Image (cartoon, rainbow, N blue to C red):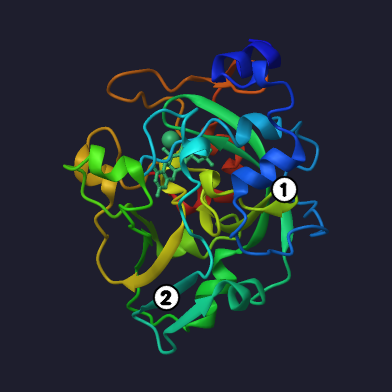
Amino acid sequence: MLFRSFLRQLGIAGAGLAWSPASLARAAGTNGPVVPAKGAPRNPDFNPKLPLTPEAIVTNYNNYYEFSTQKDRVAQLVGRFRTSPWSVWIGGLCSKPMTLDLDDLLKVAPPEERVCRFRCVEAWSMVVPWTGLPLAKLLSKVEPSPDALYVKFTTVLRPDEMPGVARLSDYPWPYTEGLRMDEAMHPLAFIATGLFGKPLPKQNGGPVRLVVPWKYGYKSIKSIVKIELVREQPETLWNTLAPREYPFESNVEPNVPHPRWSQATERDLATGNRIPTLPYNGYADQVASLYPRK
Ligand SMILES: Nc1nc2c(c(=O)[nH]1)N[C@H]1C(S)=C(S)[C@@H](COP(=O)(O)O)O[C@H]1N2
Ligand SMILES: [Mo]
């Protein structure tokens, strides 16, 4: 599908300059934090040559069930969501638990930009320039203890600001996700605070989210307020709702179909074309060694 007809399908092409910088700033919210994402150098190790999916698509086609199950509605519904002030508690099995406000978090490591493939379990994909820092740098700050075998992440829960929560009243809110400790410490696991050189828009999980590019998109939890080091594999929202459809591990595996559809190909949001899905979403060289054949 052509870019313009895609936008039309989203209902924003008719609005002309719906994706002008001013309207993007409006979408990001006037009370959003000031994040020095601009000027973050692009890390050459991460797909620097992949063509980016247009920003208007990345910021208007969102999965964020706290707001809506309709992808083209999320950006319009985040207006009341307050992302400043923001702080993240990091604790559990570690010797230095701490609460970092966003400014502290941004100082943990110099920001870098990474271009990453992003593959949703629903078989669509995009290519996104994130700004942020490796998750490992953040976790090292709290000095994890050896018995920390998993990391549990939790999204903020504010039903008053998140109109989708009440509509899905039987969901096990808040949204939670998890990684094995060795996955979390892998250099590809990333904490994003920016997108396209700007502060991370609320609809994309601003002000701070996880990005795990070799796993299906639902692992990349948005608007994080809590990171807990734990001994047991944590419960997660999707795994609790439908364990057969959303396994904890969730690596991108083209040969393993979802119970309701094939995972062999994906729809590229930039072009509308179906393209082959790559093992580990194209990151096999980096991460396959984490998963020795059983
Ligand atoms: N808190 C929260 N995080 C979430 C989700 C969600 O509904 N709530 N959706 C997930 C899914 S299924 C995907 S594909 C990605 C979508 O990220 P994007 O909107 O930035 O493309 O966010 C993930 N993180
Ligand atoms: Mo997804």
187 or 109, nearer to the observer: 109
Q: Which residue is mark 2?
A: 89
Q: Is mark 1 within 8 Å of ligand 1?
A: no
As displayed, is residue 235 above or below residue 251? below
Q: Is residue 170 visible?
A: yes
Q: Are marks 1 and 2 in contact (CB under 8 Å)?
A: no
Amino acid type at mark 1: Phe
Q: Is residue 126 left or right of residue 157?
A: right
Name the front one of labels 1 and 2. Answer: 2
Residue at image point 36% right, 23% down: 257
**Disc 1 or 2, which lies upstream in sequence?**
1
Amino acid type at mark 2: Trp
Q: Position of residue 222 (x, y in %)?
A: 46, 52
Quarter of the image holding residue 3? top right
Q: Which residue is mark 1?
A: 46
Within-10-Å neighbours for mark 1: few <14, some 14–19, many 20+: some
Q: Position of residue 182 (x, y in %)?
A: 45, 63
Q: Quadrant of ligand 2?
A: top left
Residue at image point 67% right, 31% down: 56
Residue at image point 42% right, 66% down: 225
